[in-house]
Image (cartoon, helix red, strand yellow):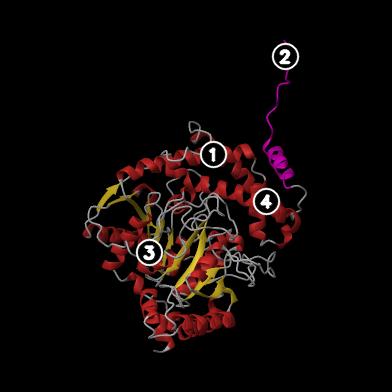
Amino acid sequence: MRTCRREKESPLKDSEKIAHRLLLLQGVHFSPADLESIAAEIEDLDRIVAELEEFGRDAPWISLQAQPSGKKA
Amino acid sequence: MSGNDILHLDLTELSKHIGDRELSSVETVKAGLARLALVDNKLNAFITVLREKALAEAERADKEIHGGQYRGPLHGVPVTIKDMFETAGVPTTGGSKILADWVPETDSALVERLRLAGAIIIGKTNLDEFGHGGTSTLSHFGPVHNPWNIDRIAGGSSGGSAAAVATGIGPLSYGTETGSSVRRPASYCGIVGFKPTFGIISRHGSFRGAWSQDHVGLFARSVRDIALGLDPVAGFDARDPASVHQERPAYTARLNAKVDGLRVGVLRRFLEGVNGEVRQSFEAALKVFASAGCRIVDLDVPELSYAAMTSMVTSAAESAGINRRWFRERHQDFVPHVARGLAVGMTITASEYLTVQRARHRIREAMRATYEEVDIVASPTTARVAPLLSDGVKGNGDDTRHASYNQSNLLRFPSMLGLPGCSLPCGMNTEGLPIGVQLIGAWFADQTVLNAALAYQSATDWHKRRPALFDA
């Protein structure tokens, strides 16, 4: 059986996380002041998503399902 | 009847006069346009005014009515619509520079239905760019001012619609709501704002803020007028994936102010930061419901403390998805604050969005259980009165980024979950600014919400107050 060995990952620093996210802007350029404001919001977003992840942990994943006609959903 | 007398008539009265041929559509439309010309330099509530087109349509409506072809309560009545709805041959901007010169070839579903009902669209109202905001200050066409005090915001994003109805520029306006964009401006401008259950009014041909939270809603000066405006535009439309099959709308016919035994839930824990005068007015409103025979039930739904955050992340991700192409190609043409918001939304990953939808599901289930215990949830619509325009987008003070008992959770959960909600005037503060109470019902309990709102208006006269600009 083949196994895959992974190097131990070092956690990303906050500034690296933000830089990774800014890459998702796909080359759209903002002024330094705008980037600072966007980076601050991204920091908030990281925290918010972590809070919501914990809160929603036991909820089912969303899915779209049709019901047979005539049956109550 | 003078132009000013006409403007004082609500939709119910106006329709009767037009239907009985005691008043012409042309006279009525002229009165609305005259008021618009008089006050809009102070309000900036309109992006496009349809003077000639509206007068021509009014003449045609008069001919039809005189010829015995009366179509119903909206026939010949001047109405306004938020500039989010496509109108064939008429510019549709979304409040954005990007579409400043765009003229669609077809009508949105809302406009189709309004035309079928014989309504006369006299203007398209100003808004936060593509509905992204809560102040109506984020428009390429400049901010909307509050009719009660022009140094204050009208609220957003449908601020132009609310300001128009509050000053008598038509008895009815149609807007959209993704977070609180109907109820908030209605509260700040001292009028009624209603957003039905998700899927009741088709959104086909309107711009999207966030598809899973977008609703079409209405503004009027009374609950009866809201029902009259809702009947002709509600109904299934296969072109909107969220549209629901429903029986023929008959909200007006089923209005009933008897609310004896109605269970009204109050989430007191979420009222801690609410302004003192707003809270006093809300408590007084609860007494009105109690006097009408309602049972006031104290509730605790701690899951709602995550509602504002969940709504905001969902909106940010969906609006980034919707605007992806324009963001890449024309980001410099967005209002700067909106562009920054879209940039943040662009960085939300698919797994994060889906994670947030689990939180949304948990809140939905908590509210489903809540509506087994009560029929309506009541709260102040906003935690404070309309803030100063100079305070900018921070003025609303409800940008909740933590799980908390902040009232803004109560403002945002109805649209996030698709629940029907109505904001009603329930008081004035010492500065003469309106205060609103909101009633939120269970899914498809739109009639219950309207009936409770009617019961409140039958016992009070807050909805009859007018800003000084109304008699300008």
- Determine the secondary structure under disc 2: loop
Tags 4 and 1 both on a single chain: no
Q: Amino acid at mark 3?
A: Leu
When the figure is inspected, residue B42 is found, relative to residue B321, above or below; the finding is below
Which chain does the numbered disc 4 sit on? Answer: B
Element at badge 1? loop
Q: Verify whether residue B239 appears in magenta.
A: no
Q: Is residue B325 above or below residue B24?
A: above
- Identify the main secondary structure in magenta: loop
Judging by the rendered image, the residue that carries numbered circle 4 is B343
Q: CA distance from mark 2 to mark 3?
A: 65 Å
C-alpha gap between disc 2 and disc 4 = 40 Å
> Can you say whether B154 is above or below B341 in the image?
below
- Closer to the chain start, of discs 4 and 3, is 4
Secondary structure at badge 3 equals strand
Residue designated by label 2 = A3
Q: Which residue is mark 3?
A: B424
* Left or right: B438 as drawn, with respect to B146: left
* Dot 1: chain letter: A
Q: Position of residue B405 (x, y in %)?
A: 42, 47
